[in-house]
Amino acid sequence: MERIIRSACAAAAWFAVAMLQGCGGGGGSPAAAAPLPVASSFAPSSSLAARCAVPRTGTDASRGGLPFPDGQGTLDDEKRWVRSWIDETYLWYREVPDLPAADYAGPVDYFAVLKSPALTASGSPRDRFHFVYDTEVWNRLSVGGVEAGYGIEWALLARSPPRRMVVAYVDPGSPAALAGLARGAEVVSVDGVDFVSGTDAAAINAGAFPEQVGKQTSFVFREPGSAAPRAVTMTAVAVTKVPVQGVRTIDTPAGRVGYLHFTDHIATAEAGLVDAIAQLRASGATELVLDMRYNGGGFLDIASQLAYMIAGPERTAGRVFERLRVNDKGPFDIGPAGLPTPFHATTRGFSVAAGSPLPALGLGRVTVLTSSGTCSASESVVNALRGVDVQVNLVGGATCGKPYGFFPKDNCGTTYFAIHFEGVNDRGFGDYADGFAPTCAVDDDFTRPLGDPAEARFAAALGLLATGACPASAKAAVRDPALVRGPHRENRIFRPPGARGP
């Protein structure tokens, strides 16, 4: 994965510390915090926008080929824009400290400290979701899910020696898939460096998480069921994420159960979900196990479409999928009542022509496989369905707890993500900063493929559907592995698909 995130919280090495610690996941009920003083007024951010220390030239493909809006400015201009934009749009703008811009080298460094210092009940920072991206890279990731790599979703089971990192899944057609790698393969070495006990973090990072296409890396893996290690050499390519995988229907005592592995609410997921739900409907599925254990979120409109396709028109007609609540200044032309997102009954034009009717299963119950990596827009699906009286059972681990979201904003080639809204369902509920607790707590099972009825979480879901009870092996709580991924995949993002720009 590219090191494309330019923020203080993302500067730490993948291997040496928690990936993007402080940028995504986690949460908790905010502890009371007295607002810190801020300057009484700032110039409108619109009057400061596009005054760039290094203006972009040429045309902007994300804006329909229009010229970049950038004009000549300074780093101080960019910092002034950041401060004004935060004051106008940030959900907790009253809590942002008044810090001198001159103390920070550039706008990204300044942005990193312009957030609420409030703590959660557990003592963690309430705002752990403050980050930026290079705009060009953000456009590529958010629209097509394209990034440099081998097509591996990594799960870090132990970050201190003896370290353990395994393949959670691979994207079809990727170098990893073509090399025959599969879920559960465990890393032994990277470019000759001992992964388990070695100290050369730079070499491991460079090999396991390539920044550019063309990087060739030699791995040694230990695979499930095999005593002999296997050497695999892969070359990084521009991998396109495949967000919908493993669609199938199986016969069980509870009836025909559909299974769907959904990994990312990116633009291409619209077509994948439409095809998957249509397939499950045609197969006669009367129950659904939705595997979102590795889904960190993305576009809210994609989540709305999925929830509609699960619940159907009768339960969702006239109901709100999620209502966005912003600060009391009413940014983004959102009033005190908030901005309702309906349950979308038609496609939105992300990867299917806008206005096409969506297929629907019309279920009154759904079972969702979850983990601490189930974040943001994925949690919106759970919360929204519960808001219209769909029974949602969770099997696995507690979700990450992120009822907040962003309106990404580009300025001078950097796209900024500050918390702009919190979301509530049709009943007005959105208090899940500690995450949703599982109905049945079950460890992740890397010994079997995803979608295998014997895989621990899927098996527990099938057992719950058949008997109404959790398996005897269920626990009070589980400790999920850390997913090695960037914050662009742990989001609740509101952006109409027809909008231009990031």
Image (tube, helix red, strand yellow):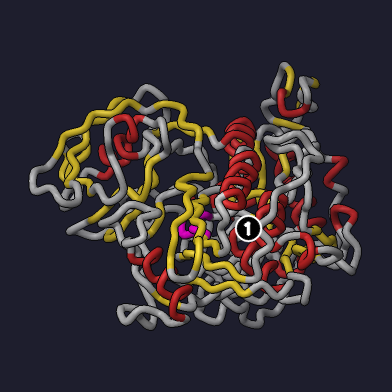
Instruction: Tell me which corner region of the image, top left, top right, bottom left or bottom right, holds residue 306.
Output: bottom right
Secondary structure category for the residue under label 1: helix
**Residue projecting furthest to the top:** 58
Against 86, residue 126 (above or below) is: below
Q: Is residue 236 left or right of residue 418?
A: left
Query: Is residue 82 visible in this depiction of the protein?
Result: yes
Residue occupying the point 70% across, 33% down: 412
| Residue 441 placement (x, y as % from top left) | 41, 76
Q: Nearer the viewer, residue 448 or 66?
A: 448
Name the residue tied to disc 1.
377
Q: Is residue 218 left or right of residue 261?
A: left
Q: Nearer the viewer, residue 7 or 215?
A: 215
Residue occupying the point 72% across, 66% down: 422
Q: Amino acid at mark 1?
A: Ala
Against 493, residue 135 (above or below) is: above
Q: Is residue 336 left or right of residue 500?
A: right
Q: Is residue 124 magenta?
A: no
| Residue 295 placement (x, y as % from top left) | 52, 54
Q: Is residue 292 magenta?
A: yes
- What range of the chain is rendered magenta? 290-295
Quadrant into which the N terminus falls: top left
Q: Is residue 172 left or right of residue 199?
A: right
Residue occupying the point 44% across, 60% down: 251
| Residue 479 placement (x, y as % from top left) | 36, 70
Badge 1: residue crowd in 10 Å (few <14, some 14–19, many ≥20) = many
